[in-house]
Image (cartoon, rainbow, N blue to C red):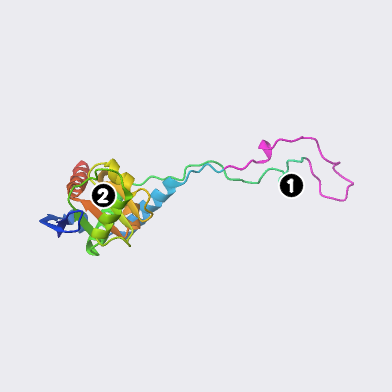
Amino acid sequence: MEVAVKNISGEETGRSVSLSDTIFGVEPNDHAIYLDVKQYMANQRQGTHKAKERAEIAGSTRKIKRQKGTGTARAGSIKSPIFRGGGRIFGPRPRNYGFKLNKKVKQLARKSALSYKAKDGQITVVENFNFDEPKTKNYLNLLSSLALSDEKSLMVLHAPEKNIHLSARNLANAKVTTADKLNTYDILDARHLIVSEEAIQILESLFNKKANDN
């Protein structure tokens, strides 16, 4: 698939890049996408929730009333879960929600997500650029030139560019990442991908390297 390369003014440069069918033209696997997104979201959970159980409550261990003859249920401790201020029964404990996912499944998920975007024409390739200074206005002008002001977009760069990251930081519908950190969730969360020319080459080299390693 050939895609025209544009500059930051939204004009075609006369060049084009070829999107590899092994990355941008695979048969999408929805289940692989589901697993990869599920793992990503699970890894975002802190898992630091904690409630005290009866053994952890501070309080007297004195038997609060005699065993029989009161006409009420027997009770042995003020820390019992049935009393106000007592411990909680089977309360939440700190845990890790992450789970293992094979590298090949994650790779297939990213390829599937990229293939969906390519099929729907939601990938724009721009020539490599940087801003002289971090200004949100510069990034807004870029989105306007590409007719993406009203779209949720993801900028994929070949390497970290501080001025670009800072320029997009205050925009709710814009995110910037690099090719080596691209994940399935971010691809699907964005309505449109803006990929730098060199980032395309890095993506292809990364996927080809992983394929050779496997």
Mark 2 surroundings within 10 Å by alpha-carbon count, few (fewer than 14), some (14 through 19), many (20 or more): many
Q: In which quarter of the image is the C terminus?
A: top left
In this orientation, does residue 193 appear?
Answer: no
Q: Give, as a three-letter code, the residue at label 1.
A: Arg
The question of residue 204 being in magenta is answered with no
Residue 163 position, x and y percent, is: 28, 43
| Residue, disc 1 | 84
As drawn, the label of residue 127 is none
Q: In which quarter of the image is the N terminus?
A: bottom left
| Residue, disc 2 | 156
Q: Give, as a three-letter code, the residue at label 2.
A: Val
Looking at the rendering, which quadrant does residue 213 occupy?
A: top left
**Residue sitting at 33 percent across and 44 percent down?**
166
Going by the picture, which residue comes out furthest to the right?
69
In this orientation, does residue 36 appear?
Answer: yes
First to last magenta residue range: 50-76
